[in-house]
Amino acid sequence: DTGVSQDPRHKITKRGQNVTFRCDPISEHNRLYWYRQTLGQGPEFLTYFQNEAQLEKSRLLSDRFSAERPKGSFSTLEIQRTEQGDSAMYLCASTPGGGGNQPQHFGDGTRLSIL
Amino acid sequence: AQSVSQHNHHVILSEAASLELGCNYSYGGTVNLFWYVQYPGQHLQLLLKYFSGDPLVKGIKGFEAEFIKSKFSFNLRKPSVQWSDTAEYFCAVIRTGTASKLTFGTGTRLQVTL
């Protein structure tokens, strides 16, 4: 169990630029989740995948956000035309199958700062 | 939709003091409940979880939590805190039997002084 891996750890970019983050879940975990956490708040759900299928998206996930998990392993989260309000920590989590009875394992997150 | 409230935003305790962090959730159905901890510079880690059965659950590092269904509460306790317990604590809920999202509270920052 090598844990959930996220890359990069930090990303600083100018407003209007596109950014992409990567998440590698724990091996053989077929569920993968993305959350966003802003200062003083708990993580907020963005979207989740079972294998390569994106099964749920939050209303927080505007049209500028897109997530993929093409082969059911790693996932990417892209933000187009970044805005100041996108500054946050983006967290990835994974679980094996088994419904809601499996705790989610979190990565270290990618901290996004918009200049 | 479910929601989670954590009443204490910042708690300061001396070492050896007892800890109780409040967590209330709002949801009409059956839920699974979690406490996660985030130590400075580290990722979220599971402290303990409640799915069913004994409402008093024990987790790692001497933490425990009690699920009181009638009060929609899942308070976290520790009889004697240590300096190393300094961290942020998050209560979270998920609807039973779903693979969907965790709903988190806003977190409680615990600072333990020597």
Image (spheres, helix red, strand yellow):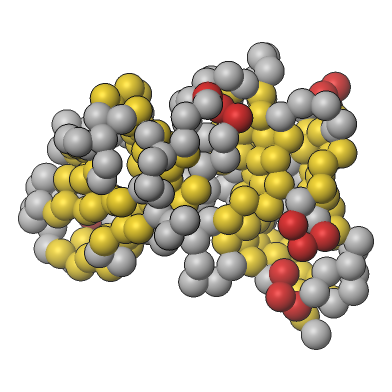
Instruction: State the residue at coordinates (49%, 71%).
Output: B41
Q: Quadrant of residue A64?
A: top left
Q: Is residue A54 visible?
A: yes
Left or right: A60, with A12 as reference point: right
Q: Quadrant of residue A89?
A: bottom left
- Number of numbered markers: 0
* Towards the viewer: A58 or A96: A96
Left or right: A112, with B68 as reference point: left
* Towards the viewer: A21 or A29: A29
Q: A1 above or below A73? A: below
Q: A50 above or below A36? A: above
Picture coordinates of residue A106, whole percent (x, y): 46, 51
Picture coordinates of residue B48, whole percent (x, y): 71, 47
Left or right: B56, with A44 as reference point: right
Q: B63 above or below B35? A: below
Quadrant where the C terminus of chain B lies?
bottom right
Q: Is residue A40 visible?
A: no
Instruction: State the residue at coordinates (82%, 42%).
Output: B57
Q: A114 above or below A106? A: below
Picture coordinates of residue A33, whole percent (x, y): 38, 38
Picture coordinates of residue B42, whole percent (x, y): 50, 67
